[in-house]
Structure formats: C-alpha cells, structure tokens
Amino acid sequence: MASPTNSSQNGGIIGVSNAFIPAANQNARVTTFTSSGTLTTQALTTEVNYLVVGGGGGGGYRLAGGAGAGGYRSAGYGPSPLQGSAVPVSGSSPYSIVVGAGGAGSGPSPEFGAQGVASSFSTITSTGGGAGAANTSTLAQGGSGGGNKTGSGSPTPYQAGNTPSTNPPQGNAGGHGVDASPNIKGSGSGGGAMAVGGSSTAPFNPAAERAGGAGAPNTITGSNVTYAGGGGGGNEVQPVTPGGAGGGGNGGTGGSPGPSNTTAGSANTGGGGGGGGCGSAPSGVYSGGSGGSGIVVIKEEAISRAASAPGVWSMQSLYSNVRAGTWTN
C-alpha cells in the first residue's frame, strides 16, 4: 500500500468551492452635499457615518419670533447625546441625497415665516425648521420649533421641536414672547439642535433672553463646524437693545428698533432666520430673516481586508498541513 504522504495515491477534497479573494484596502472618503445629488458608495463600503441637517425656518414679521433650526441628525462625529447609529449600505450602489432649502422670512404678509425643507439620505430624514411666529399653526413645528410672537405668553404645542419624533431627538422647541409696560416687547427665539429657544420676560434681561437655541458642533468634514442654531427673536425695547443672537453662530439675529439688522440663518448649516424687530426705522427692519439651507455629509471609513483562501483542499494538503502544525480553520 502506498505511503499516505504520497500525493499521487491520495485523493479527495474537503470544503466548499470558493474563489480566492485577495487582500484589499479602501481609503476613507468624505462626500459633502450642499445641494441635492447622488452618492455612489465605494466597493468595500458596508456602512456609513453621516450628518443630515434640514433647512432652517424663516423668521416672522415685525416683533416676531425667530425661526427654528433644521433638524440635526448625525452618526459618529457630533455630541454624544445626539449620536445615532451608522447606516448600512451596499458597496458600489447609488443613493439619492436631498438637501433642503431654508424657509423664506416673512414680511409684510403673511406675518409668519415659511418652514424649512427636509434633507434626507437613505433611512435618515431631518425635518425643516419651524417658522417664526406661526403661533397657532403647525408651520411652527419642525426639526426645531419656531419662536412665538410678542405678547403670546407661554409656548404653544405648535412650537414643538423634534417633529416628527426621532431618537436621538433632532431638535428642540421654540421660546415665547412678552408684552409688558412700559415699552417692553420681545419675541421668542427658535429652537436649536442642542437647546430650546430663548423666551422673553418682564423685566427684560437682554443678556439672557431671545437668543436662538444652541446649535451642535460636528467634525465629520475634518473641521469643527456648528450646525442647526435657532434664530434670535425680534424686539421693541426702550432704550434700544439688540435683537436676540442667533444660536451657535449660524442662526439669524433678531431685529431691534433702529437700523435694519435682522439676519438670515447661515447657508448650509440649517440655521433659523431671525425674527423682525419694530420701531421708528423704515419698514425693512420689520422683515424676518430667511433660514439657512441644509447640508448632507457622508463619511465612508477606511477598510483593510485580509486575503481569503479558497475553501477547496486536497486530502494530501490537509494531511501535510496538519502534520506540520500549519492547518487552521
């Protein structure tokens, strides 16, 4: 009988028939969309991290609330309380990307701004920001809610943020206004990704009131940028005080008596527009600021894949490897 080490006399195979898969590497890739388009993933990509921000809402007209920021949803590179999970994808596949526009600021009619437009990628949708001073309308709802008008009292259900609800939440509610004597009139500010919009009270505290809700920092692009800040509320206060500051540096500033100073939310951050002020200045000061457009950023992480050997082996190869102590499975 032939020796068992004689390959010419020993036959048979073990395992399933698989092709040899060579080692492969794929670099990380960040793709930023400031307008709608299509993402085609790299061949080895199986999941991605993301930043999806909706368009900010438009601010209200004349002594009106600042608008809510666009919804903020992220995985991998933002504040931990707001981090979602990576999204599974198929390599070499196209995915539609929608970047929402900011809502128009109001003035003179209607007296409330327009909602921002949603941004989306795959299963992730970030709602547009709520309109400023839409006190009794669902237009004030959104990723973050719009602030209500001077004299409107407590926030209303219409100013809710995180609408529709996501987990983690995509935004916060807007603040409320006040109308008190003498000459103390201020409006609420829009909510932001990290905080509710500021509210006005009497007596006035300009340093603490009417600021838009804070936005959220994110480093997915390689730079630390703040997104989704709420718009500041407008006011009429004597002596003159500034309108509310925009949240996180990208929400619009609210108007005040004097020169026209209401500003828009920053483009491609989803910032809410500032609310219009009031006073003896020309009517242009009354108009609300428009919301900033949204953004979508997708990051494919670097991948390193080891080689995979075929699953077909001769009995002789198995025997030789086992005897040499080099067989693994």
Image (cartoon, rainbow, N blue to C red):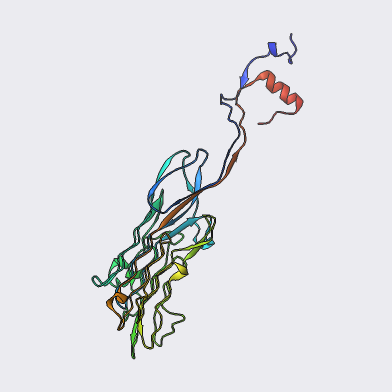
Provide residue 165's location: percent of width, then percent of height: 39, 60
Q: Is residue 240 above or below residue 60?
A: below
> In the rendered view of the protein, which quadrant contains the N terminus?
top right
Q: Is residue 10 above or below residue 246?
A: above
Answer with the quarter of the image where residue 264 lies.
Answer: bottom left
Provide residue 108's location: percent of width, then percent of height: 25, 73
Left or right: 319 in relation to 61 = right
The reply to whether residue 186 is in sight is no
Left or right: 181 in relation to 46 = left
The reply to whether residue 223 is in sight is yes
State the residue in front, 27 or 287: 287
* Residue at the farthest left position: 109
> In the rendered view of the protein, which quadrant contains the C terminus?
top right
Kindly identify the residue that appears in the image at 50 percent across and 58 percent down: 83
Left or right: 59 in relation to 269 = left
Answer with the quarter of the image where residue 137 lies.
Answer: bottom left
* Residue at the farthest bottom position: 182
Provide residue 292's location: percent of width, then percent of height: 38, 63
Provide residue 90's location: percent of width, then percent of height: 46, 40
